[in-house]
């Protein structure tokens, strides 16, 4: 079970990414994705995310990364 504080942090990061994608802010969306992935990795290394929750969060982030592959200028 994810701690409430950890879940809120991940939700904030995912929401920032989604908002930037919806508004077609490609550079900000790329930055938000990098920030999200770094946050997920940091949470795993600190022990705040167990293996199951890490896999789920990482899978969701990777899905967004695949959707954004063509985002460049």
Image: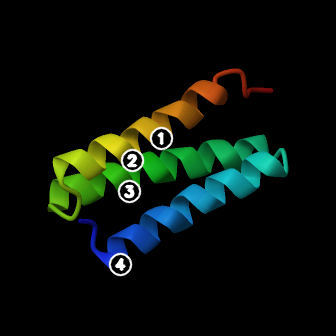
Distance in Å between CA atoms under marks 2 and 4: 15 Å
- Mark 2 or mark 4, which has the lower sequence index? 4
- Indicate whether 49 appears above or below 62: below
Residue that numbered label 2 is attached to:
57
Give me the residue at 17% from left, 61% from top. 46
Mark 2, secondary structure of its residue: helix
Question: Is the residue marked by circle 3 packed among few (<14), some (14-19), or many (20+) residues within 10 Å?
Answer: some
Residue 31 pos. (x, y %): 60, 48
First along the sequence among labels 1 and 4 = 4
Quarter of the image for the C terminus: give it: top right
On screen, 2 above or below 42? below
Question: 29 or 10: which is nearer to us?
Answer: 10
Cα distance in 3D space between marks 3 and 4: 13 Å
Q: Residues within 10 Å of mark 2 (few under 14, many from 20)?
A: some
Residue furthest to the bottom? 5
Please say if the residues under marks 2 and 3 sit with CB atoms less than 8 Å apart.
no
Relative to residue 45, is residue 64 drawn left or right? right
How many numbered circles does the render carry? Answer: 4
N-terminal-most mark, 3 or 4? 4
Q: Position of residue 36 (x, y in %)?
A: 47, 52
Kindly report the distance in space between the C-alpha atoms of the residues bearing marks 1 and 4. 19 Å
Which one is nearer the viewer's eye here, 15 or 71? 15
Q: Are marks 2 and 1 in contact (CB under 8 Å)?
A: yes
Going from the N terminus, do you reach mark 2 or mark 3 first? 3
């Amino acid at each position: 079970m994810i701690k409430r504080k950890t879940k809120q942090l991940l939700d904030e990061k995912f929401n920032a990414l989604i908002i930037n994608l919806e508004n077609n802010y490609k550079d900000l969306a790329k930055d938000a994705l990098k920030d999200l992935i770094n946050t997920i990795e940091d949470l795993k290394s600190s022990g705040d995310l167990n293996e199951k929750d890490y896999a789920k969060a990482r899978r969701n982030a990777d899905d967004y990364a695949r959707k954004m592959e063509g985002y460049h200028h």
